[in-house]
Amino acid sequence: MSHIALNSGHKMPTVGMGLWKIPKSVCADQVYEAIKQGYRLLDGACDYANEKETGQGIRRAISEGLVTREDLFITSKLWCTYHAKEHVKPALQKTLGDLQLEYLDLYLVHFPIALKFVPFEERYPPEWSHQPGGPVIPANVPFRDTWEGMEALADDGLVKSIGISNMPGALIYDLLTYARIRPAVHQIEVHPYLIRKQLVDLAHTEGIAVTAYSSFGDTSYHEINMVPTDRSLVHLLKHGVINDIAHRLGKSPAQVLLRWAVQRGCAVIPKSSNPKRLKENLDLFSFELEDADMREIGKLDKNLKFNDPAVYAKRAIWAS
Ligand code: NAD
């Protein structure tokens, strides 16, 4: 398994499995199956509403001797309603309890957007709106408070590394002025329709590893009606440029998209419930894209973000 060295001194597998939108009913089995297939990084979040089931899958894999806890790299994310410093640790403890784990390998701030606190017993996970379908209510919590809460978790040994997600460059520069512990990872949407050269370069220049999510672009967003209908868009997995390269290399279009991200120095966390796809998504190191292929794929950029709270959480305070 290939790894990326983190500025925290730990190392993160280059390929993992994403857990967003995996239904509770199948999550434990899929986590177990992924570990059995060789996945060591699992990318979860409180917001994915499947941490208990993720924990059951991990527990089964460990108790059957497939892996030890130390073999795994488990990521979760702090939700927006828990940004106040006093809520950061209880949120992490809730996640750890659900996962049946003593520590996380990586804890990310899911979005740099602080929302009004929602107690666990009222609604968990709280999602974007305080009330289902209601408005998004911001909270007056400076990101610095949140980050100090995250640093305290690392100090306590509850998380090995801390990081950020969905953060614009200007906010990263601000964070770096006060961070006692620098973010180890920035997890962002990256695919050929959203290349984000400057944001990826900024992170790498500052020694922050980048995890690219939604590597298959629009693929993940059709089922939740988050693909803009006003643009005529070729499904990324069916794009001629990607398919021509895949055909020439004898690989799948999915592998070409993942390899493109990996070759830019990013980690990837594709989600799949299909055993054949799980296997192919892990097989990214038996081939390489030529410079000309990288350049051709680079020309597909449309600066098109599918996962944009400015669109789906309209009242979020957000400038991307
Ligand atoms: P993804 O790009 O991994 O796409 C998933 C879709 O692609 C699924 O429909 C799956 O069936 C299909 N697929 C998977 N492998 C395939 C293959 N080999 N061939 C053809 N189709 C294939 O989508 P994603 O779930 O949006 O992103 C991956 C992970 O990133 C998430 O599960 C989550 O862990 C993380 N993520 C994080 C954030 C964040 O805000 N930090 C946001 C979105 C996603």
Image (cartoon, rainbow, N blue to C red):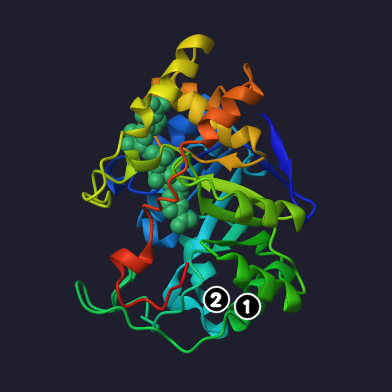
- Indicate the position of residue 256 as horizontal and vertical percent values: 51, 25
x, y (%) of residue 47? 39, 61
Between 164 and 19, the one nearer to me in the picture: 164
Of residues 155 and 204, the one nearer the viewer is: 204
Ligand 1 has an atom within 8 Å of the beta carbon of the residue at disc 2 = no
Residue 88, which numbered label? 2
In the image, 291 versus 263, the foreground residue is 291
**Quadrant where ligand 1 appears:** top left
Rendering quarter of residue 106: bottom right
The image quarter containing residue 317 is bottom left
Q: Amino acid at mark 2?
A: Val
Q: Which mark is residue 219?
A: none
Quarter of image, res 80: bottom left
**Mark 1 vs mark 2, CA separation in Å:** 6 Å
Instruction: From the viewer's perspective, tell me whether residue 137 is left or right of residue 279.
Output: left
Give the crowd class for mark 1: few <14, some 14-19, many >=20 residues within 10 Å: some
Q: Are marks 1 and 2 in contact (CB under 8 Å)?
A: yes
Residue 138, percent from left and from top: 39, 83
**Disc 2 element:** helix
The N terminus is located in which quarter?
Answer: top right
Q: In this figure, what is the number of numbered marks?
A: 2
Q: Secondary structure at mark 1?
A: helix
| Residue under numbered circle 1 | 149
308 or 241, which lies in front? 241
Q: Residue 69: where, in percent of width, then height?
A: 62, 44
Q: Which numbered disc flags the more N-terminal residue, 1 or 2?
A: 2
Give the amino acid at mark 1. Gly
In the rendered view, tell whether residue 1 sits above or below residue 71. Answer: above
Task: State the residue at coordinates (68%, 71%).
Answer: 173
Dot 2 crowding, Cα within 10 Å, few <14, some 14–19, many 20+: many
Which residue extends farthest right? 9
